[in-house]
Structures are given as structure tokens and as C-alpha cells.
Image (tube, rainbow, N blue to C red):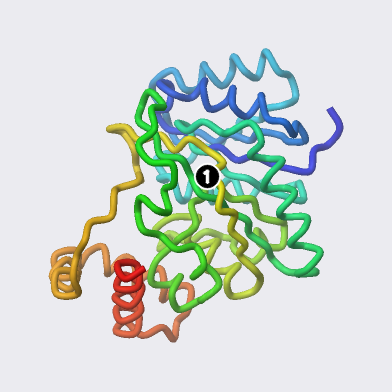
Amino acid sequence: MNHPIISVYMATYHGDKYLKQQIDSIFTQSNQDWQLLIRDDGSSDNTISIIQDYMARYPGRIRLIADKQRHLGASLNFGQLLEYTDTEYIMFSDQDDVWLPNKIELTLDAMKAAEQIYHDRPVLIHTDLKVVDFDLNTIADSMWSYQKLFPDIGNDLNKIMAQNVVTGCTMIINRKARDVSIPIPAEAIMYDWWVALNVARFGKIVYLSLPSIFYRQHSENKIGAKKAKRINVANFLKKLYHLRKLLSAHYKMVKRFDPDASFWLLVLNKISVKVAQRCR
């Protein structure tokens, strides 16, 4: 095939249970102008053999990145993939979801429209998700509603430092967004949050209020969709106390992003975002 304009990055690790469905959903996209780059993080199941089978069936469409590093975790696995960019646009794929047939077409069209407005700037497009169980039965038609996430805060740097609203497996970014986001540091809680922070600072985040994937929930999810519960500020502060390790990791990421960031301002912004979610 001619050199494509989109790289689809897939980070795998012990993904043999659902991997075929995900790869098949990429191959049945309405837009086929892509290459699939996969990096495995040290699987000992059948993940590699499944990938090699697809490589044999579709020569030139899939590239398996081989290096000696193992067990980096999802964020740094995607971070390694970002080092191999040779296309104008980049998308990210989990190993266990299913893409809707127009995902690439939908988000690429939105990207090109946004680039007409935000010339020569980093751009990130992301979408809502349909939450499903392991058999693809619907749990929620909208993850944003299910989790009470509000993507309109994406370009508010203080708020997105407090809470991420961008889900990586729905993103498409342009090369400029990649360039301002690499390398993904060890302090990043997840690669998508780090990329969103940098695009919010230097460019523009655009959201589409349509789902582009079936977001599968199962017992092995590293990160999943949990239904938002009604809480008050007092309960939230108690939760922060008990989750101090998580907050510490959050602050380390923010400090890496902005060395002048204030811990207490981060806490206040996080509370503000949570309160706003409950009031909408």
C-alpha cells in the first residue's frame, strides 16, 4: 500500500482474549488509510502469535515493534510507540475494545476541520465512548454521562491538570501534538493525560459528543469506566486522605508538567471540578 497518513498505535500485554476482535474492527474501518504499529510489553500468552498471524495475512499493514524492554506499563508502552512516528496523524488503540466502523473517518474529518482553524498548532480530537461488558452488551450509551465527565474543561489547563477528560483510545492527534508531548515521563499517570496537558497548553483539544468505540469492561481492565457516585465535599476530602498515594502520584505528574505548580491549588481545582460535576 502507499504510505498512509495515520499510524494506529496498539499497546499489548496478555491480550489474547479480545485482541482478534479489536484488530478486526480496525481492518473493517470505512477509512483504510492507516498502518498498525504494535508494541508488546512482555506477554507470555498467545498475544504475539495472534499478531504474527495477522502480519502474515496482511503483509505490510502491521508492524510489530521489537525491543528489549519489558513490563513498562500501559503509559510508557504507548510512550515507546510515539518514538516511531512517521505519519501526519496518530491514533491509539487498546487491545480489548471494538472500534465502530467510522471511527477513523469521523475523527480524521474533525481533525482536518480543526486544523483549518488552528493553523500550525497541536490538535487533539477525542470522542465519547459506549460502555459495554465483556460480551459487548451495553452498560451505558455514553461514558461521559456514566462517569459525569464534562469534556468542555479540556482546554482549561488548571481543570485538566486536576482531572483528565480525554480517553486515549478515542484520540487522534496531529504530529505537532506528538512533538510537544514526547517523551512520556515516568511520572505520567497515563499517556493520554500527559498528551492532553501538553495540547491544552500549546494547542487545541476538540471533542465530539458521539461514541467511536465499544469500551469493554472486564475483570482485567487496567483502567475502566466506573459509574460516578453521589458524594459531597466532605466525603470527597475524606477520600483524598485515604487516596493520598494516588494524589501524590498525581502531583508528581503535574510538577513534571509545570515545576511551579502548587499542591494546594491542584487540590482546590480538583475539588472544584468534582463539585461542578455533581451540580450539572
Q: In the depicted view, which residue is nearer to us: 275 or 16?
A: 275
Image quadrant in which the C terminus is located: bottom left
Q: Name the amino acid type tagged 1.
A: Cys
Q: Classify 265 as above or below 124.
A: below
Residue 255 location (% of width, % of height):
41, 76
The answer to whether residue 211 is left or right of residue 15 is right
Label 1 crowd (10 A; few <14 / some 14-19 / many >=20) = many
Residue 188 location (% of width, % of height):
43, 61
Q: Classify 44 as above or below 188.
A: above
The residue at the point 48 percent across, 44 percent down is 129
Image-quadrant location for residue 265 = bottom left
Residue 59 location (% of width, % of height):
73, 19
Q: Classify 129 as above or below 188.
A: above
Image quadrant in which the N terminus is located: top right
Figure label count: 1
Q: Classify 58 as above or below 118.
A: above
The residue at the point 40 percent across, 34 percent down is 216
Image-quadrant location for residue 139 = top left
Q: Residue furthest right?
A: 2
Disc 1 element: helix
The answer to whether residue 208 is left or right of residue 144 is right
Residue 33 location (% of width, % of height):
77, 35
